[in-house]
Amino acid sequence: MAKLKMMKIELLALLEDSKKIIDLLQRKGVVELKDEEQEDGLQKFATAGCVSQFDRYLQTALNAQAVLTKYAPAKKSLLDSFSARKELSVEEFDALTDRADNILSVCSDILAYQKSIDDKKADIVRIQAQLDALEPWRDLDIPLKNASTAGTKLYLGCMANQQTREEVLSLLAEQAPQCEAVEVEIIHADKIQTCLAVWAHESCAQEIEQALRLIGVNRPPETFSDLPAERIRKYEDRIKANVEKIREDTQKLESLGSMHSDIEFVIDYLAIRKEKYDALNRLTVSESCFVLSGYVPERDADGLKQQIEKDYCAVVNITEVPEAEDPPILLKNGTFAAPVESITEMYSTPSNNDVDPNPVMAFFYYVFFGLMLSDAGYGLIMVIAMLIAKKKLKMEEKTKKTVNMFLFSGIATVFWGVMFGSYFGDIIPVIFTEFLHKPAPRMYVWLEPVNDPMILLLYCFLFGIIQLFAGLGVRFYQLWKAGKRLDAVCDTLFVYLLIGGIAPIGANLIADIPAAALTIGKYCALVGGLGVVLTSGRSAKNIVGKLGGGLYGLYNTASGYLGDILSYSRLLALGLSTGVIASVFNMLGTLPSNPVVKAIALTVVFIVGHSVNIAINLIGTYVHTNRLQYVEFFSKFYEGGGRSFTPLSVNTKYYKFTEEKTNG
């Protein structure tokens, strides 16, 4: 399979049927709408206000869900994240739709409880700061405000570090030696500060006030007519009241834990409503009719046209997409290639000039994934886990593709593990030698990477050349199909000859290559190199430009392919690292000399070590397999830059509706 052909759909219908037709298109999920241009006699369907309102409601529900998850988490297992959305019948949908306003009201209550809790917590912080500042004055038996008499002046304040009464009086005497009518009382003193009360006769009050400033006495942060102990008690009571209110609001939130499913429904419901009215905003309308246009896959076009024209007073026109337009891309592949579609889409959606690379890439992707992981035990775990998931879990289509990708990758991993004799590293030979005291059997079918790394490296380069040549083959097909047959021959055939001829010559540096192969390779490389020189500069207008372009093309081709081929050495590197690390863990488990202790140690190290090894190497294998496709393979033929097909559909997160109904 490949890219599905897109058709252009244009529809004219009665305005009174607009919402019903949009509902139908949303349920079908096969039409991507275009924004209609406003023409004479037509105007935009004004739904921006509704979309904004639904967006506010949706944000309210999402915020309420986050709050409820914090105080009353829904009980879900790890496997629930892989399960398909829950299904709702029409009756269940209608019942919940009628409750949508009530559920939104509960969402508002949840946010109100959270706001109350936040406000009370902030108030506690503020009061606690005031309480901490007032605590040193607790034992003061006069108010912090207006405590002076007719003949005396009272000054209350704090100074740094711990001071005694005598030290304060001495400091005041130095600053105001003429003032003798002064008394000091230490209210509180510690290493950080000293709180004190200073009485001065009215005749020298100003001098004492200035002296207090000079020795670093600062006024209390707040003053009031209550006694400090009374104000502290009020603050403590206020904190207790806030704590009690927080407890009550928390209990109310915890009691709403059963609302999780209802809020999930409202989130999906509002998302549908928002998308529907956003779609209506793309239409143009007259007093009695509306117009829409968009793109529809050819396979769905006729059936949709017949249904709309049968059920509504409407005219549907299905035509070829004009060349000036850039239609969206929809991929359709079989079970083997579909799982790697997400890999391609992470890089870029194919353009309309590209072929779908997934059918060609899938084989190489699975083979290279398995070659990098290359342990039959690890592969078997992947296969079993994916088969159990397919059997036990009800998954969405996207999740099924991911599971299938790891299933096929696991099968390839088992294959290469058998070829290399790696079953959880060298655990079988370890058991034979350490516990059964017998010679270790031969485990590999083809070769052992640790003992023959250079041979495997050559094969990795060979696998890389095969994939690069496959990419060139796709390039040849694209150019030939586009009518550029000379370009197809010049840009691919000579590269085949050049790289194919150099390959055995380069391999001869590591291994013995038959003389006949070297001779054939030499002549192929000469013909290919000459062809590249003669054709790479063919677009230049003069002989000098053609020659310069040809020489540059030869250099660019040779150096570029050399770098690409060397990149496939990562197949060996990651394959070796998986097996070596696994063997190291096995060796660590056999260090004890006592057989019983050794068996226990090996069991523990085996479980922990191999779990870590498979987790780390799965990530590395996934990343580097993707890189080989993106950098080496795609660069030979793939442009990308296409736009994915995004039809109007029922895009829900939690529920799958058997039939999407409307209420306005």
Image: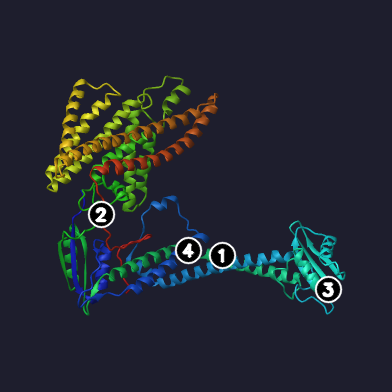
Q: Residue furthest right?
A: 180
Query: Residue 50, relative to residue 478: is it above or below?
Result: below
Of labels 2 and 3, the one closer to you: 3
Q: Nearer the viewer, residue 39 or 127?
A: 39
Q: Residue 229 in the image: x percent, y percent?
A: 76, 69
Say which label, 4 or 3, has the lower sequence index.
Answer: 3
Say which label, 2 or 1, has the lower sequence index.
Answer: 1
Say which label, 4 or 1, has the lower sequence index.
Answer: 1
Coloration mode? rainbow
Q: Residue at x 31, y 45 (%)?
A: 404
What's the mark number on residue 258? 4
Q: Residue 168 in the image: x percent, y percent?
A: 82, 62
Of labels 1 and 3, the one closer to you: 3
Q: Amino acid at mark 3?
A: Cys
Of labels 2 and 4, the one closer to you: 2
Q: Secondary structure at mark 2?
A: loop
Q: Amino acid at mark 4?
A: Ser
Q: Which residue is mark 3?
A: 204
What's the mark number on residue 250? 1
Q: CA distance from mark 4 to mark 3?
A: 72 Å
Of labels 2 and 1, the one closer to you: 2
Q: CA distance from mark 2 to mark 1?
A: 50 Å
Q: CA distance from mark 2 to mark 3?
A: 88 Å
Q: Residue 105 in the image: x percent, y percent?
A: 46, 72
Q: Nearer the viewer, residue 598 or 216?
A: 216
Q: CA distance from mark 4 to mark 1?
A: 15 Å
Query: Residue 505, relative to residue 371: is it above or below?
Result: above
Q: Nearer the viewer, residue 507 or 56?
A: 507
Q: Which residue is mark 2?
A: 642
Say which label, 2 or 3, has the lower sequence index.
Answer: 3
Q: How crowded is the residue under tag 1: few (<14 C-alpha within 10 Å), some, or many (20+)?
A: some
